[in-house]
Amino acid sequence: MEYMFLPLKRYADFEGRARRTEFFLFMLFRYMVSLFLLIIAVVVVAAMGGIGDFHSSNFSELKPNDLPPALLPALIVVGLLLLLVWAALLVPTLAVMARRFHDQNQTGWLALLYFPCYIPYLGLLLDLVVLVLMVLPGTVGPNRYGLDPKGGGEHLENVFR
């Protein structure tokens, strides 16, 4: 649980290294928050009557006047909440990705691969590339970005002293 919130504690810290556990638990936290907000959106639509009177074959006949008047503002509020959460978690996401790349002894600038992931079709491919890169193990022992976050490799330092 500590690793899930560690990127929030190190909000804009792009220095050092991060374990796979820290990255994936933080991403799980992000997806849980987003899912929670999406569930709220579904509940709001259902509570306000939504579009339950229409069948899937009649969606082409749906007119804006047919929707409950308070539905659109409620969905806008939930959408703005989703956007606000995304914006608030953007910096810690980039920071933990940069530290994860540092753990693999790569430049943290690769974290900018996160932005093209929102381009249709290309984004899916880049998401898979980033996922594979995040799954790769880090370097054992210290590297140019800091000490091993797992604490491994100290025995190697003693051997070569």
Image (cartoon, rainbow, N blue to C red):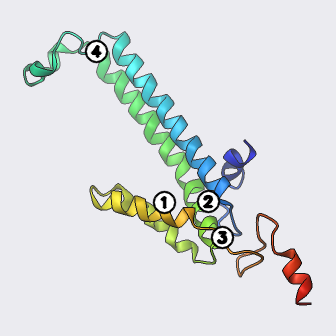
Measure how far apart labels 3 and 4 are at the Cα level.
48 Å
The image's mark for residue 131 is 1
The image's mark for residue 98 is none
Q: Are marks 4 and 1 in contact (CB under 8 Å)?
A: no
| Residue 15, x across and y down, in percent | 69, 69
Mark whose residue sits in front, 3 or 2: 3
Q: Badge 3 is on which residue?
A: 138
Q: Badge 2 is on which residue?
A: 96
Q: Residue at x 27, y 55 (%)?
A: 120
Mark 2: amino acid: Val
Q: Can I make out residue 11 in this image?
A: no
| Residue 148, x across and y down, in percent | 77, 70
Mark 3: amino acid: Gly
Q: Badge 4 is on which residue?
A: 50
Upstream in the sequence, badge 2 or badge 1? 2
Upstream in the sequence, badge 3 or badge 2? 2
Upstream in the sequence, badge 3 or badge 1? 1
Left or right: residue 3 versus residue 157 is left
Q: Residue at x 63, y 47 (%)?
A: 25
Measure how far apart labels 2 and 1 are at the Cα level.
13 Å
Mark 4: amino acid: Gly
Count of residue discs: 4
